[in-house]
Image (spheres, helix red, strand yellow):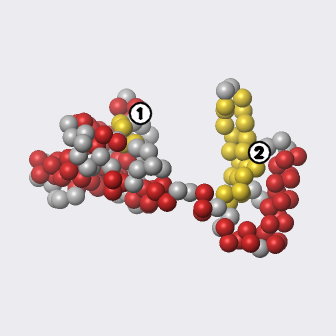
Amino acid sequence: MTTDFLIDMEIDGVLVSRAVSVKYAEDLEDARTLEKQEIERRFWENEKVAWYAFTEHDVPVTSVKNIRWLASHMHSYDLEVSERMGIFERIAKALDGNSEEKLPVPLRELDDKYAQEPGAHLQYFRHLAAQHAFLWDIHGTLHTKLKARDIELSEYWLNQEANYVHAK
């Protein structure tokens, strides 16, 4: 038997561990699976580590949709530093000036201003958001409802300390 995740984190200066078992909800209807889960739970209890069972029902639908919307764009570009920072700053400025607009509006204006194909800046936004340049409550706001005011700029990107993930 194995535990899917053992997470170590610091909370108020104290190192705390959490054990997580990931299963499909339907698998938890199987008696043998439940028996193994109970053995795993008791093991971690004996180790004084909090144990959690996690299923697909524990992930909000909004989160899943937003992550899917972003994930496919993580490696869609391989931008050099000056190009990615220029695009980041351009989008950040457009968002700041259009706080009440839905996200596509200022991005479409950038496409026009920079003579780009329609949707180019939306694709850049998705790529940079997947790289954590642009942040929002992905658990509470679906990407189709995003307004410019909902989006925060990453301090790491603003300070040019981001770890950019290059395309493979």
Quadrant position of residue 23: bottom right
Q: Nearer the viewer, residue 156 or 153?
A: 153
Q: Residue at x 17, y 59 (%)?
A: 118
Give the residue type at disc 2: Ala
State whether residue 90 appears in this view.
no
Give the mark, 1 or 2, whose residue is nearer the N terminus. Answer: 2
Labelled disc at residue 36: none
Q: Nearer the viewer, mark 1 or mark 2?
A: 2
Q: Closest to the observer: 158 or 34?
A: 34
Q: Residue at x 75, y 56 (%)?
A: 3
**Above or below for 161 versus 128:** above
- Seen as rendered, the residue at the extreme right is 46
Task: Measure how far apart labels 1 and 2 are at the Cα level.
Answer: 32 Å
Left or right of 16: which side holds 154? Answer: left
Image point (37%, 57%), residue name: 73
Q: Which mark is residue 156?
A: 1
Q: Secondary structure at mark 2?
A: strand
Q: Is residue 89 left or right of residue 109?
A: right
Count neighbours of disc 2 (C-alpha within 10 A) and say few if under 14, some if 14 to 19, many if 20 or more: some
Q: Quadrant of the C terminus?
A: bottom left
Q: Position of residue 163 (x, y in %)?
A: 44, 40
Q: Name the spot of residue 122 as percent of width and height, x first.
A: 27, 54
For the residues labelled 1 and 2, say whether their Cβ atoms are less than 8 Å apart: no
Residue 80 on image: x %, y %: 31, 44
Left/right placement of residue 99 relative to residue 21 reads: left
Q: Is residue 30 positioned above or below 46 on the image?
A: below
On screen, residue 50 above or below 11? below
Q: Amino acid at mark 1?
A: Tyr
Q: Is residue 44 visible?
A: yes
Q: Secondary structure at mark 1?
A: helix
Q: Which mark is residue 50?
A: 2
